Amino acid sequence: MDPTRMFGLFDVTGSGMSAQRERMSLIAQNIAHAQDTNRGDGLPWRRREAVFETVLEGEMAGRVTLAEVQEDFRTPMNRVRDPGHRDADAEGFVTYPNVNPIFEMTDLLAASRAYEANLQTSKTFRQMVEQALGLGR
Amino acid sequence: MDPLVALTAAAARGDQGAEAAASAVRSKGDAGGPSFSDTLDKAVESANRLQNEADDALRRFAAGDVEDVHQVMLAMNRADLSFRMTLEVRNKLVDAYQEVMRMQV
């Protein structure tokens, strides 16, 4: 009896849930830093997104993992004129992060649903094994 | 308490059927293949390993070292299912032994 083969599905769904959790923590960061004009290096916060990739295990495409955290350079930053602001540039413009709360909330919903889907897969698999064990009785 | 230890202890205490059945299968199987006793040993061993893993995960969770709650739950799922499977095998074995003992001679 090789439990890694028997319950390998739990590893796969578990990695999916972990991946979605990471994604959710990035969304949380984006929302928290939505008005952050200085992230420590003098630049404003830039929206971060998760990039996932497959962990290859022999022939079976197994788990999914967070490949990298990518900064969003496609969405333009928000420039607001506010000459009195500490982080205003020479022309009196302050650059705010390119975080759109509506977009983040939609992403949050998607992440939560994807987590749920993985959870449901685990539950269903567990039920299948339980039913199979019932054969012995 | 480790459920597998509990199971073995229960077998040693009162359940003579389990005890006798266990000693009955301890003898080598024929035809050179692994004996049933070896296979059962392996199954118990891996079930025990999964129990320990779940224990570990739970301990880390209690200590606050875990960020993925679901990994703890999945470890417990794995341990539970493999333990129950071993238990089913054991039940079948005891059933078979008792069936044989009921035979008229």
Image: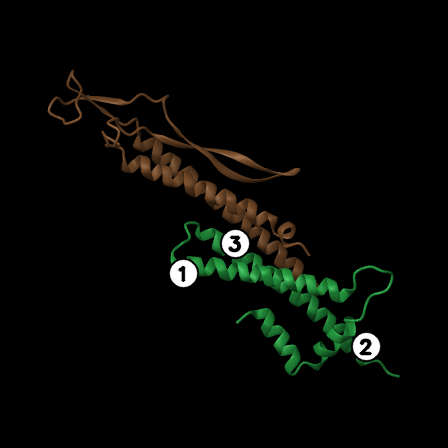
Chain colours: A brown, B green
Which numbered mark, 1 or 2, is in the foreground of this view?
1
- What residue would you read off at disc 3? B74
Which numbered mark, 1 or 3, is in the foreground of this view?
1
Of residues B81 and B31, the one nearer the viewer is B31
Q: Report the side of B98 relative to A43 (left or right).
A: right
| Residue depicted at x 32% and y 32% | A102
Q: Amino acid at mark 3?
A: Leu
Residue A56 position, x and y percent, is 59, 37
Q: Is residue A16 above or below residue A34?
A: below
Can residue A112 be seen by looking at this rendering? no
Q: Within 10 angstroms of label 2, few (less than 14), some, or many (20 or more) residues?
A: few
Q: Report the side of B69 relative to B42 (left or right).
A: left
Q: Residue furthest right?
A: B105
Among the two numbered marks 2 and 3 on one chain, the one whose residue lies closer to the N terminus: 3
- Which chain does the residue under circle 3 lie in? B
Of residues B57 and A30, the one nearer the viewer is B57
Q: Within 10 angstroms of label 1, few (less than 14), some, or many (20 or more) residues?
A: few
Q: Amino acid at mark 1?
A: Ala
Residue A132 position, x and y percent, is 66, 58
Circle 2 — which element?
Answer: helix
Q: CA distance from mark 1 to mark 3?
A: 16 Å
Q: Amino acid at mark 2?
A: Val
Q: CA distance from mark 1 to mark 2?
A: 48 Å
Residue A57 position, x and y percent, is 62, 39
Mark identifier at residue B100: 2
- Which chain does the residue under circle 1 lie in? B
Residue A104 position, x and y percent, is 35, 34
Q: Report the side of A87 relative to A15 (left or right).
A: left
- What residue would you read off at disc 1? B62
